[in-house]
């Protein structure tokens, strides 16, 4: 079983640390990637870490992951609430999917309370800041370990 995990990030996350730090914190996406890579090494996971402001690129990476990955962590950002196309792509992925949101979307505007991605996700982590990515990697590793046992 593959221990490759894709970590996919949606629109505006390239501005992490600069955009609304009172909501998203001061860490950059590079900081998140560094921390994910360190934890992945500890958990014996391989990582592909991507960010795009373009929906089709996220869909292409999900399609790519179908043939290579044992799990997927996704912070779809605003696409969470709008993208049936990302949901459809995730529905073709037959391994664990963990959805991550840095902020607690349930304490924010009502339109953020609905997630298309959650219809496919095996778990959702919200409101834990960027630590949510590490929690998601730990969950994927746990699911992969239980499948291997």
Image (tube, grey):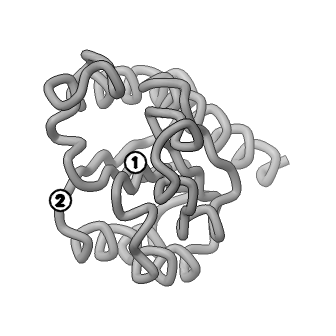
Residue positioned 59% across, 42% down in the render: 106
Q: Nearer the viewer, mark 1 or mark 2?
A: 2
Residue positioned 19% across, 57% down in the render: 52
63 and 107: which one is in front?
Answer: 107
Residue 112 image position (x, y, % from top left): 48, 54
Crowding at mark 1 (Cα within 10 Å: few <14, some 14-19, many 20+): many
In the picture provided, is 35 more to the left or to the right than 122?
left
Q: Earlier in the sequence, mark 1 or mark 2?
A: 1
Q: Which residue is mark 1?
A: 7
* SS for dot 2: loop
**How many numbered marks does the figure carry?**
2
123 and 103: which one is in front?
Answer: 103
Residue positioned 30% across, 67% down in the render: 58
User: In this rendering, is residue 73 above or below 120?
Assistant: above
Q: Which residue is mark 2?
A: 53
Crowding at mark 2 (Cα within 10 Å: few <14, some 14-19, many 20+): some
Query: Residues under labels 1 and 2: Cα distance?
Result: 14 Å
* SS for dot 1: strand
Find the residue positioned furthest to the right: 149
Residue 72 tag number:
none
24 and 107: which one is in front?
Answer: 107
Residue 77 image position (x, y, % from top left): 36, 52
Callout 1–callout 2 Cβ contact below 8 Å: no
User: In this rendering, is residue 113 above or below 49?
Assistant: below
For the N terminus, the image quarter is bottom right
User: In this rendering, is residue 140 above or below 117?
Assistant: above
User: In this rendering, is residue 99 above or below 67?
Assistant: above
Residue positioned 39% across, 77% down in the render: 63
Residue 26 image position (x, y, % from top left): 25, 16
């Amino acid at each position: 079983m593959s221990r490759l995990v894709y970590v996919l990030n949606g629109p505006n996350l390239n501005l992490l640390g600069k955009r609304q730090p009172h909501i998203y914190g001061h860490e950059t996406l590079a900081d998140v990637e560094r921390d994910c890579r360190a934890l992945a090494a500890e958990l014996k996971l391989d990582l592909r870490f991507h960010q795009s402001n373009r929906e089709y690129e996220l869909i292409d990476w999900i399609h790519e992951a179908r043939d290579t990955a044992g799990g997927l962590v996704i912070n779809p950002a605003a696409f969470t609430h709008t993208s049936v196309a990302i949901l459809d792509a995730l529905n073709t992925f037959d391994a664990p999917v963990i959805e991550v949101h840095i902020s607690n979307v349930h304490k924010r505007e009502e339109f953020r309370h609905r997630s298309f991605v959650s219809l496919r996700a095996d778990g959702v982590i919200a409101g834990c800041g960027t630590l949510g990515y590490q929690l998601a990697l730990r969950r994927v590793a746990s699911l992969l370990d239980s499948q291997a046992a």
